[in-house]
Image (cartoon, rainbow, N blue to C red):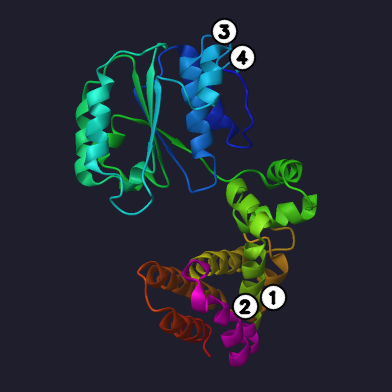
């Protein structure tokens, strides 16, 4: 297998290469991982390798590779859902099934890229299962999903699952600096830590500048908690009034800070990238209070995802965080 522009997950990529080079690639693969980790990039790379006519696949030079790269290959088909629950409809899967029994136009394989497959309805997954049980020898399905847990066990049992994770901070920061203007290595590394090694999310945050601001607000919330400054806490949380996604991000980021605090030592690698805040919380709060704060973050995130009223959520955030630290 040829190399490509993909940072991290080296062992996983090596295993994919072995499958490609073996000439016996599985009929169904599920690539799971949160948004921004490179699921679509890896899926497209595998598709190109499967249709490639070169010796070292994908060669990025043959006609088949060029067509794959240009998204015009007649044997590579892409389908994707909008991202909402059950938004990948059974009718789409039925259209796919009608096509799979037609032999490839040019390549040895017909490759179907099914994005956001975790948004498939149960009926859509059951329809797909029918062809997964006895697929034509030339058909490969590549499903991408944020979590395999949303897929039926019967679908997973007929698939090879590939899990992508966050990358090494140094390697990731080097990649970000080479692909983004006006950011230094240390800032890139700190931003990458904020997103647990997720390069895609980190680059997006650098471009819009909003995420770093939210991370700083989360740090302000932590300081307000230990200083017992209710006004500062309310002021920091006021930014969430018009943006529910900011609340979801804050719950995740605060949870990382509280986790860092539980295990922090001077040479700790902190998930949040905010060792100073983690150290401060460790000296000010007991382990039980930090554990309670982590639990509160999970509950608040669930409320945010359930479309609770923002004003009510902000009040709940302030009350629940203060209660957890005994205020």
What stretch of residues is rendered in magenta? Answer: 224-246
Give the labeled residue for mark 2. Answer: 222
Find out whether residue 170 is within the magenta segment: no
Locate residue 97, reporting x and y percent. Answer: 24, 27
Per the image, label 4 sits on a secondary structure element best described as loop
Q: Nearer the viewer's eye, disc 3 or disc 2?
A: 3
* Residue that label 4 marks: 61
Location of the N terminus by quadrant is top right
Secondary structure at numbered mark 3: loop
User: Which one is closest to the eye, mark 2 or mark 4?
Assistant: 4
Q: Are marks 2 and 1 in contact (CB under 8 Å)?
A: yes
* The image quarter in which residue 88 lies: top left
In this rendering, the label closer to the viewer, 4 or 3 = 4
In primary-sequence order, the first of circles 4 and 1 is 4
Mark linked to residue 280: 1
Q: Are marks 4 and 1 in contact (CB under 8 Å)?
A: no
Taking depth in this image into account, of 243 and 155 the one nearest to the observer is 243
Along the polypeptide, which appears first: circle 3 or circle 2? 3
Q: Is residue 52 left or right of residue 222?
A: left
Disc 3/disc 2 C-alpha distance (Å): 56 Å
Q: Residues within 10 Å of mark 4 (few under 14, many from 20)?
A: few
Q: CA distance from mark 3 to mark 1?
A: 57 Å
Residue at 26% from the left image edge and 35% from the top image edge: 93
Q: Position of residue 13 (x, y in %)?
A: 55, 29
Q: Secondary structure at mark 2?
A: helix
Our reading of the magenta stretch's main secondary structure is: helix
Q: Which residue is mark 3?
A: 55
At 51% from the left edge and 40% from the top edge, which residue is drawn?
A: 164
Mark 3 closeness class: few <14, some 14–19, many ≥20 residues within 10 Å:
few
Q: Are marks 4 and 3 in contact (CB under 8 Å)?
A: no
Q: Is residue 243 magenta?
A: yes
């Amino acid at each position: 297998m040829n190399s490509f522009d993909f940072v991290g997950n080296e062992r996983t990529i090596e295993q994919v290469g072995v499958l490609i080079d073996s000439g016996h690639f599985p009929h169904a693969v599920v690539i799971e991982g949160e948004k921004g980790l490179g699921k679509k990039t890896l899926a497209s790379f595998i598709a190109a390798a499967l249709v490639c006519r070169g010796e070292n696949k994908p060669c990025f030079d043959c006609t088949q590779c060029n067509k794959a790269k240009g998204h015009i290959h007649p044997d590579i088909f892409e389908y994707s859902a909008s991202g909402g629950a059950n938004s990948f409809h059974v009718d789409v899967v039925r259209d796919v099934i009608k096509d799979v029994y037609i032999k490839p136009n040019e390549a040895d394989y017909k490759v179907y890229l099914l994005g956001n497959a975790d948004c498939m309805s149960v009926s859509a997954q059951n329809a797909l299962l029918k062809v997964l049980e006895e697929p034509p020898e030339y058909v490969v399905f590549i499903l991408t999903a944020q979590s395999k847990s949303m897929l039926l066990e019967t679908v997973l049992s007929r698939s090879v699952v590939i899990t992508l994770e966050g990358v090494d901070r140094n390697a990731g920061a080097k990649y970000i600096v080479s692909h983004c203007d006006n950011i230094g290595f240390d800032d890139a590394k700190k931003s990458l830590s904020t997103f647990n090694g997720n390069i895609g999310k980190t680059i997006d945050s650098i471009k819009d500048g909003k995420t770093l601001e939210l991370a700083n607000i989360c740090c302000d919330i932590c300081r307000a908690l230990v200083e017992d400054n209710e006004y500062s806490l309310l002021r920091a949380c006021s930014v969430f009034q018009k943006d529910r996604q900011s609340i979801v991000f804050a719950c995740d980021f605060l949870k990382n800070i509280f986790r860092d605090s539980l295990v922090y030592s001077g040479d700790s690698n902190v998930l949040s990238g905010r060792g100073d805040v983690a150290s401060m919380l460790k000296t000010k709060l007991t382990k039980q209070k930090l554990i309670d704060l982590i639990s509160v973050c999970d509950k608040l995130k669930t409320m945010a995802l359930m479309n609770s009223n923002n004003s009510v959520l902000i009040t709940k955030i302030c009350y629940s965080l203060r209660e957890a630290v005994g205020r």
